[in-house]
Image: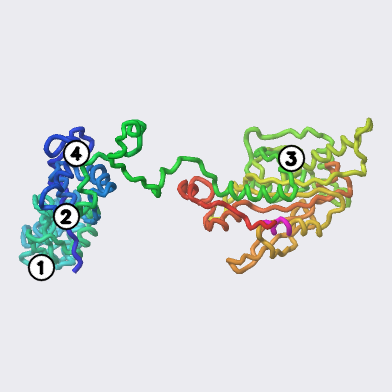
Amino acid sequence: KNRVEIIRMGDSVGAGVRAGDSSSLAVGSGTGTVEDSVIGVFEGTEFEGDSSIDSVELARRTGVDHQMLVDSALKRLVARNVLVSQPTSHQSITLTAEGAKYCTEGSPEAQLFRAVAASDGGSLAMDAAENALGKDVVKIGMQNALKRKWLAFDKPTRALSTTTNEIQDDVANQLECLRISANSSNKPAAASISSNGNNNSKSSDLDESVLKTLKQRKLVALKTFKTFVVRRGPAFSSARAEVAAELTAEMLQSGAWESVAFKPYNFTAAGKDAEAGCLHPLLKVREQFRMIFVQMGFSEMPTDRYVESSFWNFDALFQPQQHPARDAHDTFFLSAPASARVDDAAYLQRVRDVHERGGYGSLGYQYKWSEEEAKTTILRTHTTAVSSRMLYQLARELENNNNNTGGGGKSAEFFEPRKYFSIDRVFRNETLDATHLAEFHQIEGLVAAKGLSLAELKGVIGEFFRRMGMTRLRFKPAHNPYTEPSMEIFSYHEGLGKWVEVGNSGVFRPEMLRPMGLPEDVRVIAWGLSLERPAMIMYGIKNIRELFGHKVDIATIRANPMCRLGMTA
């Protein structure tokens, strides 16, 4: 049978010096250090040859707390090869507060049996039993007493009656055996408890099935601890010789280095981990995307405007004011400040006109556009709001150049192509789950130049994703309010064995660009994707809340590997 050995640590070290006591450095004969006392023990003739001693007994002989002996003297002597040690695992068993109570008063089933047996006629009502013993004792005791057929329960009268004249409270016997074991002065001090409850004080074994039952009832607590079998080491003969940790100038000058024994250097020992900051996986992945954009000649747009007006986030993009994305259940609206300014009144009027009556080949949306609605403040829902501001500034720059007739101005027919990108946080009133958060990061790239078409869009996207290591792409027609044509981007995932959506793209509509003042032949192509999805795939994270938010494990952040997207030259 499996047996569990009980080792009692208390008395063997209780009389000694406790850790933290300054007198622990003067033990044994009254002079010297803990190491001297330990060496003195092993200088006895009983340890000649290969004889050994348990560290608990060694602590008792030197009068030192066991943990202090192991952490200080024993570790240093083993490191110097003065001693050798072999660890041994033990399990100590202690009674819980409930177990100690039952050890004295008897198990609940035995208490309940005695109460029923002592009642008139050998029968006792449940209410009376609960008043006498308490509901907890009756509940536990009744369950076990019925199981062991000590008692019978009559449902109509709710009364308990005895079914036997005598019982053996083996639970109390087992707990008493453990209590005696803990107070014994022998080492190892224990009692053997077999499945029939017999107490054999000379044995040091406990039947594991009994222990399992006591643990399930939370009557005992089992803890694992470690002791060491210690014997002399190869360098014991020179244990008291002076050992120098380093070579000093005084040793060289006096010549003492020739006779001094030096502590050997451990060149393979690991140094202490340096405390330093670490990069979040999202920052690592973001930097890789930034490198791809920079390598392709893109310039980063300023993205520090988290609070945006509905005008730049929606209206300037030719997104109608009745669009579902503009409802409170999809967008976070600010109460203070509740509105924002739009300084360019002429541009504001052009946006109003294209929404209400159309233009540039469009019929518009044919509704009453509200300036008040356009000026409401929100947390931006996409980084395209940044793109709309950059394109507006680009139109103003082109206008200023065309109006500069004093020399140095560029021709109206000249338009310098621009390539912009942004990677930053956006906010949406999403229902939180394993793949959605109320705030996340969006990656966006755009190219503005004359004569661009869908072919150039697919070509730029193909190069962008090729540098990410995605070479198998597909495009599917889609709808966006501010791009036409629009396409969803799919890539074949080798690990999943299927096509997965990786982004969205399109060509900005004239209804968005022309009111800004951009020339008729200037086209803007754009695409976007999230930052969290590729990061989750790269780091094998299934729940987005483990990547971003208050549930992130800091230890995991410190240990995560570097990020390297599948870029090629």
Mark 3 in CB contact with mark 1 (< 8 angstroms): no
Question: In terms of secondary structure, where does tag 3 sit?
Answer: helix
Please tell me whether residue 536 belongs to the stretch shown in magenta: no
Q: Residue at x 62, y 51 (%)?
A: 531
* Residue under label 1: 163
For the N terminus, the quadrant is: bottom left
The number of discs equals: 4
Amino acid identity at mark 4:
Arg
Residue at the image point whose x is 15% and y is 34% from the top: 31
Nearest to the observer: residue 268 or residue 123: 268
Between the residue at mark 4 and the residue at mark 3, the CA separation in whole angstroms equals 75 Å
**Residue at the spot of label 4:** 18
Q: Mark 2 or mark 4, which has the lower sequence index? A: 4
Instruction: Give the residue number, with chain letter if any, for mark 3.
Output: 374
Three-letter amino acid code of the residue under disc 3: Ala
**Quadrant of the drawing holding the C terminus:** bottom right
Q: Nearer the viewer, mark 4 or mark 1?
A: 4
353 lies left or right of 161: right
Residue 98: in sight, yes or no? no
> Residue 357: where, in percent of width, then height?
85, 47
Name the one closer to the observer, 442 or 351. Answer: 442
Q: Does dot 1 land on a helix, a strand or a loop? A: loop
Q: Provide the residue span drawn in magenta.
A: 462-467
